[in-house]
Image (cartoon, rainbow, N blue to C red):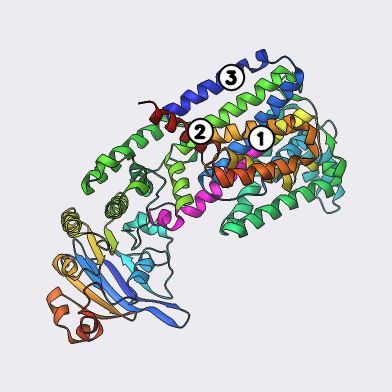
Amino acid sequence: MRRDYLWLGLLLAAAAAGPRLITNEYYLTVLIVIGINLILVLGLNLVLGYAGQISLGHAGFFGLGAYLSMILTSGQTPLEDWLRAFAWMPEFLVLAGAALHRFTAGHMVIAAALAALFTGAVALAVGIPTLKLKGHYLAMATLGLGIIIQIVFKEEAPLTGGPSGMGVSYLKVWDLEIAPNSTAYYYLVWIVVLAATLLSIHLVHSRLGRALRSIHEDEMAASASGVPVMRYKVMVFTLSAVYASVAGSLYAHYLTHVNPSPFGFLFSTKLVVMVVAGGMGSIWGSILGTALLTVLPQLLTFMRDYETITFAAVLILVLMFAPRGLAGLLEAGVRRLREARP
Amino acid sequence: MIGAATLQIQGMTRAFGGVKAVSEVDLEVGTREIVGLIGPNGAGKTTLFNLLSGLLRPDRGRMLLQGQDLTHRPPHRITAAGIARTFQNVRVFERMTVLENVMVGRHCRTRAGLGSALLKLPFERREEGRIVRQALDYLDLVGLAARSHEPAGNLPFGLLRLLEIARALAAEPQILLLDEPAAGLNTAETEQLAKLIGSLRQRGMSIILVDHDMRLVMELSDRVAVLDQGRKIADGTPREVQNDPRVIVAYLGETAATPEA
């Protein structure tokens, strides 16, 4: 735990120094994208790495956060228009929707919080039946969920803009407008990353974190030891959906546009690869894996069309040669160095 | 029976397909009582344990712990109510440390929720400190304190059994279910185990003990119940049971030649 705080301090220093060290605005973009991916992967790592439950639908939660932030803060009135389109919709609900939108359009942080709340509620409602499933079945259920969410983005055009999406306003934190691709936006994203990391560290070093790991190892023994297995699976699934939603809100205001394509199955698998490549159940491994796998495709731009293949190759190589991921490799390396030195 | 009945099992029945693994079993366990549960392989001992710990649901029957009906509760709530168990084929969390294994056992006696865990509130910190101290006490009791920071997977088999007992004890059970705790132990380890079980009774615990080591069961138990093909065929003092003709036919008579049976 003390070592985790030390690493967190180092990460904080690196994040603070980041903008000073880079010379090119493009690198700022990369660092912001790494930050957003980190929030997603930190959340997924709690589900996949700690509790041992697969989720192939995380891009869907990411998308929910992004779309809800767009809807709640839009300069137009998508929520009101969409509600009005239902013939049976009572007028007071339309008015309530309009009032909500007027409020959240002026309070975008609250909009993001509401988005996270709603996404968490979706995860809770979906998690209760699906987390009873195991292994392949859970994978299929979460995969289906992700696909359904993406279909809603494509088809509910009045609300979402359909396949071509909709514009998103610049983020305003109270009265302060934060332009995307500014250093301020970078700092905002990384403050959230550091907070998410801190919360994850706290969680994994608590009785709940231990309970999650015990579920990963042996559900039957965990429940016989007094751990409410189902409840904690649903809890951590919901928490990770909240992480994903926050990342989505940051993503929407950063791109200032949302469309359905980034929120598909492919991105969900990439997130899983980042967790596995970093090392399941290691916060620092997740961070390393995410950074590398976000940068790698940028370095390999000459084979851009084959980006997916690189991810597949990374996954296969990791599973074959480093089943405990980068974190495991580094640990083994450090141990070997120590033993070599008499 | 010593003291009043703490645990009452009435008409417990569970079938798999057409086979009645446990059929109409009644059993009472008093406070500080050690009840041996024996029977040939496949007699339904482990199934009964799975029913008592909530891992299996009974088709029929009830179980009451100090008058409280626990019959259809999920496993973690049965543990919280006061029945903890170990497993025949040891199930420790191998990639967690020895200490962490026992700390998981404290789960149902501790409270910190998601909010206080995420924020590491002072309450959570204090409770966490208490969990560590108490877990170390339980490790001390089974003689594993010195190895508390090793990964549990590193321990030899005999010590894994003790670790599993420590994890179960950490839940502060009134009733401890031990499923073949002596299997795979050598003579010295078995002796140590017998001492440990005796000391648990001193602490006010009741124990149901399943084992194939007849000497251990007969020596420790106040009462012995015999299962055969899912039915209880005898229940009495060790001496009574050993002389019961039905038991000799069903169990000792046919398999006495092979002490491990």
Q: Are both tags, 2 and 1, on one chain?
A: yes
Q: Main secondary structure of the magenta part?
A: helix
Amino acid marked by disc 3: Ala
In what element is the residue under mark 1? helix
For residue B232, above or below residue A72: below
Q: On the image, which quarter does residue A23 sit in?
A: top right
Quick one: label 2, few (<14), some, or many (20+) residues within 10 Å?
few
Which segment is the magenta one? A218-244
| Residue contact at pointers 3 and 2, CB within 8 angstroms | no
Residue at (78, 32) in percent of width and height: A301
Give the vertical position of B134 relative to A184 (above or below).
below
Q: Which mark is residue A330?
A: 2
**Circle on res. A293:** 1
Out of A159 and B125, give the one closest to the viewer: B125
Query: Residue visible at 33% across and 81% down?
Result: B229
Say what secondary structure mark 2 lies in.
Answer: helix
Residue B241 figure quarter? bottom left
Position of residue A339 measured from the top left corner of the image (x, y, whole percent): 38, 31
Q: Which residue is mark 3?
A: A14
Q: Are marks 3 and 1 on the same chain?
A: yes
